[in-house]
Image (cartoon, rainbow, N blue to C red):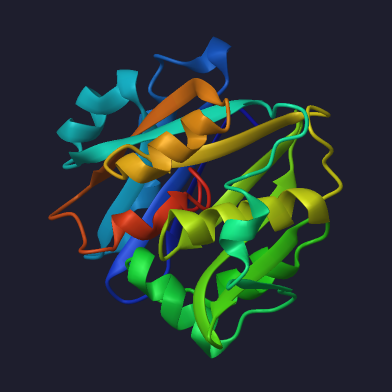
Amino acid sequence: MIASISVINYGPSFAFLGFYIVEAPYRGQGYGYRLWRHAVLHAGERLVGLDGVLAEQDNYRRSGFELAYRNVRYGGSLPANLDIGGAACHSEIEIVPLDRSTQEIVAFDRQVFPASRDGFLQSWISAPGHVSRAAYRDKKLIGYGVIRPCRNGHKIGPLFAEDRQVAEALLSDLLAGSGIEDGSGAVFLNVPEPNQIAVELAQDLGLAPVFETARMYTGRAPAIAIGKIFGVTSFELG
């Protein structure tokens, strides 16, 4: 195997492209482009999104993609004795374990993702090693998040919340639920740059930019609530 790509059709009108990788010795020989042309046929007439490395933007444009905004990966070890937002500020927010997708999770997710993805959420939330939490205020769902182990530390994604206070409450519980002690390992959060409040939260946690991508679409960027996206689910899966 020398190359890979995925195109996921989330519904009749939206698809997401990811895992576009060619082994270094085989780049520049046309293998990736042949794979690309074959894969995009799977999307048909759907709007297609991707998170591509910045250096490849011109190549993506030639294939019909246009830049919407940047996603920035913030990472690092959290400071010792970190009190995210102050526990007292979250007293009216109830955080509960989440072991499966529900209709209210799907409805909330639909505000921040261009298609309904119930099947994906069922698997993502309950996947081995994933810790998932939902946030409620006055019995109303106001956010949810997932943290998962990766080769180096943990990634948090998605982190969807009505506001920063909810995001902080979810973050605090996710970190505790995953067994991460302050400063015990790297944490990564993929933040859409237009959500300045999310950017400030990542910075206030002491995290620094380590990678970034270009979120691009084959047509008009979908109308999603970027202000509620404090952590992108996955650069490869949307």
What residue is at 63 percent from the left and 68 percent from the top?
A: 91
Toward which corner of the image does residue 189 lie, by quadrant? top right
Q: Is residue 123 left or right of residue 9?
A: right
73 to 88, vertically: above or below: above
Q: Position of residue 48 (x, y in %)?
A: 29, 55
Residue lying furthest top: 25
Which residue is located at x 46 percent, y 63 percent? 161
Q: In which image quadrant can residue 229 be found?
A: bottom left
Query: Residue 199 placed where, x, y %?
Result: 40, 36
Q: How many marks?
A: 0
**Residue located 48% across and 29% down the image:** 203
Q: Is residue 4 above or below residue 219?
A: above
In the displayed structure image, the side of residue 198 where residue 66 appears, left or right: left
- Left or right, 179 with respect to 189, comes to right
Decide if residue 166 is in sight here: yes
Does residue 55 appear to the left or right of 201 in the view shown? left
Q: Residue furthest left?
A: 220
Tell me: residue 19, above or below residue 76: below
| Image x and y of residue 1, in percent | 65, 32
Q: Residue at x 76, y 57 (%)?
A: 130
Q: Nearer the viewer, residue 231 or 89?
A: 89
- Residue 63, how many percent across, how many down? 20, 38
Q: Is residue 113 visible?
A: no
